[in-house]
Image (tube, rainbow, N blue to C red):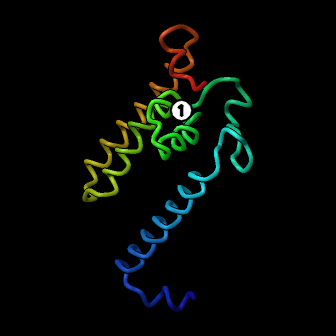
Amino acid sequence: MRLLFSRMKRGVKTGLAAWLLAAAAVCALAYLYWHDPAEGGFYPKCLFRSLTGLWCPGCGLTRGLYACLHGDYLAAARMNLLLFVVVPVLAACACVTRRAGVLKAVDNLLLMSCLLFWILRNIPCLPFMLLAPP
């Protein structure tokens, strides 16, 4: 196996890795489509939430993605509003050219969005309490 990869060109290795990653993503989405995370089972609980009692930026993403896959976008937005920011930006980044300046700006924007969302969803008063998943 090592000999096979050592003879491949760099572009072929990158393309193969991209296809394997895409196949893994499709399999994960297919599993999520047929297995509701609200029912428990395989899905792990949030370690940050378990230790602190606060919501992390990712709390509700799996249930929100499940709702999105079933066409219930309002429920998905209720679970985690960040889903509608992060997923489109990551999909766009996967499709655009790899310019360092653009990707750094997008990384900074995503990081600041996540941090702001994390802070706001843990403020215990309206309207910020609406950002926490049910």
Residue 71, placed above or below residue 126: below
Residue drawn at 54 percent across, 15 percent down: 129
Judged from the image, the secondary structure of the residue bearing numbered disc 1 is: loop
Q: What's the amino acid at mark 1? A: Pro
Q: Is residue 56 left or right of residue 8?
A: right
Residue at position x 70%, y 23% in the image: 53
Q: Is residue 24 left or right of residue 113?
A: right
Q: Position of residue 111 (x, y in %)?
A: 42, 36
Few, some or many residues within 10 Å of mark 1 (<14, 14–19, 20+): many
Query: Residue 69, image x and y in percent?
Result: 48, 47
Give the x, y percent position of residue 114.
Answer: 46, 32
Give the camera-side residue of 111 and 47.
47
Give the position of the N terminus as an image quadrant.
bottom right
Q: How many marks?
A: 1
Whether 107 is drawn above or below 130: the answer is below
Q: Is residue 33 left or right of residue 12?
A: right
The image quarter in which residue 122 lies: top right
Q: Is residue 17 above or below residue 62?
A: below
Q: Residue at x 30, y 41 (%)?
A: 105
Residue 132: x and y in percent read 56, 23
Quarter occupied by the C terminus: top right
The residue located at (45%, 30%) in the rendering is 74
Which residue in the protein does label 1 denote?
57
Q: Residue furthest top?
A: 125
Q: Quadrant of residue 66?
A: top right
From the viewer's side, name the closer residue of 106 and 73.
Answer: 73
